[in-house]
Image (cartoon, rainbow, N blue to C red):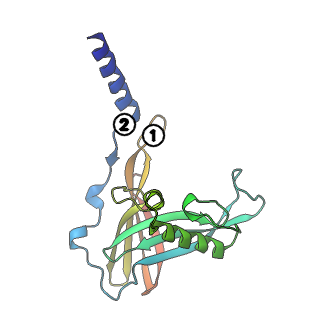
Amino acid sequence: MRTRILVLIIIGLTIHSCGIFKTHHKNKLIDFDNNQIPEKALKRNGYYFAELEREAQDFDTIQGTKIKYLSVFFIYDDSFVVNISRIDGLTNYYCAEKETYKNTYENAHKTIQLMLESQNSQEKRTKRICGFQQNDISNKGLIEIKKETIKIQIYRIEMQNPTKDSFNSAYLYENNGIMTSDSSFVITSETEFRT
């Protein structure tokens, strides 16, 4: 009896301290069932990117120079999107190991190519670790195109209560922009529904 009470107390404290995973703002999400991307609106099954720079941090391998990186959207035929930001040519990514590491946009693109190759690997372990997991909501979302406007919604995993929780909630972010051609668009605003 004493053991059972102790186990229940431990389980209760664990649930209370960690929190339960929650997906927020589902009512704001694009309606997948009624979402149709016009056939010639945007090329799909590839990636779109922005070339950006950031200041070097203490953990970076180089100091005193701006680090060139890519923010990438993988857009698929079924209107699903995967967003990966801060891909650079200097970091040794497990799923994109290469021989040379340089602070160039070209090397960052090479990293993305290696990541894509590892997702289609014939080796089961590599594919399991490096592939986009179907049930994982992190950095995934939907795209909606109406005339010249584009809306991209992505869920990011964050802490519900930053002072005591682990990363236990998915929060919706929305990027809105304008189509400039069938192979490019410009993001004009971002909404963080949490705030």
Identify the residue shown where x is 64% and y is 76%.
106
Q: Is residue 18 left or right of residue 64?
A: left
Residue 1 position, x and y percent, is 25, 11
Disc 1 packing (10 Å; few <14; some 14–19; many ≥20): some
Residue 18 position, x and y percent, is 40, 35
User: Dividing the picture into quarters, in which one does residue 192 lie?
Assistant: bottom left
| Residue kind at label 2, given as amino acid type | Gly
Residue receiving disc 2: 19
Residue ranking furthest to the front = 123
Is residue 111 or residue 150 the one in the foreground?
A: 111
Question: Dot 1: what SS?
Answer: loop
Instruction: Examine the rendered structure and indicate whether residue 110 appears above or below residue 140.
Output: below
Alpha-carbon distance for marks 2 and 1?
A: 8 Å
Residue 179 position, x and y percent, is 42, 83
Residue receiving disc 1: 166
Identify the residue shown where x is 49% and y is 76%.
48
